[in-house]
Image (tube, rainbow, N blue to C red):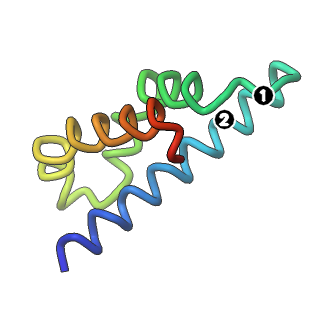
């Protein structure tokens, strides 16, 4: 089902951002927070991650889900749901 696939991609993306948060927090010696990790990861790693994730679906991910995933993360951050 496509919704399951979207949720799976969302969870993979969230895990990547959590790893980035941990690494950057360790480098700085304090917790940088999810919001900063999210923006930093999107700026530095989003494109290469999308290329890494199933290349056959890259165009679909970038065109259909890029803004939706970004908007969803922003909603989660603002609502403190994550």
Q: Secondary structure at mark 2?
A: helix
Residue that appears at 46% across and 58% down: 12
In the displayed structure image, the side of residue 33 where residue 76 appears, left or right:
left
Q: Is residue 59 above or below residue 7?
A: above
Q: Residue furthest bottom?
A: 1
Q: CA distance from mark 2 to mark 1?
A: 8 Å
Q: Position of residue 4 (x, y in %)?
A: 29, 74
Depth order, front residue of 4/44: 4
Q: Position of residue 65 (x, y in %)?
A: 19, 47
In the displayed structure image, the side of residue 56 where residue 25 appears, left or right:
right
How crowded pointer 1 is (Cα within 10 Å; few <14, some 14-19, many 20+) is rated as some
Q: Quick check: marks 2 and 1 in contact, CB under 8 Å?
A: yes
Depth order, front residue of 48/81: 81
Nearest to N terminus: mark 2 or mark 1: 2
Q: Is residue 58 above or below residue 45?
A: below
Depth order, front residue of 74/63: 74
User: Which callout, 2 or 1, points to the residue nearer the camera?
Assistant: 1
Q: Residue furthest front?
A: 79
Q: Secondary structure at mark 1?
A: loop
Q: Position of residue 47 (x, y in %)?
A: 34, 34
Q: Is residue 3 above or below residue 44?
A: below
Quadrant in the picture for residue 23: top right
Residue that appears at 66% across and 35% down: 21
Which labelled disc corresponds to residue 31?
A: 1
Q: How many marks?
A: 2
Give the residue number, with chain letter if any, for mark 2. Answer: 21
How crowded pointer 2 is (Cα within 10 Å; few <14, some 14-19, many 20+) is rated as many
Residue that appears at 42% across and 21% down: 43
In the displayed structure image, the side of residue 12 where residue 56 appears, left or right:
left
């Amino acid at each position: 089902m496509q919704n399951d696939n979207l949720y799976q991609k969302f969870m993979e993306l969230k895990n990547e951002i959590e790893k980035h948060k941990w690494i950057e927090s360790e480098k700085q010696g304090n917790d940088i927070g999810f919001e900063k990790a999210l923006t930093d990861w999107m700026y530095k790693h989003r494109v290469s991650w999308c290329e890494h994730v199933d290349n056959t679906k890259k165009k679909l991910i970038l065109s259909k889900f890029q803004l939706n995933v970004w908007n969803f993360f922003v909603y989660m951050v603002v609502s403190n749901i994550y």
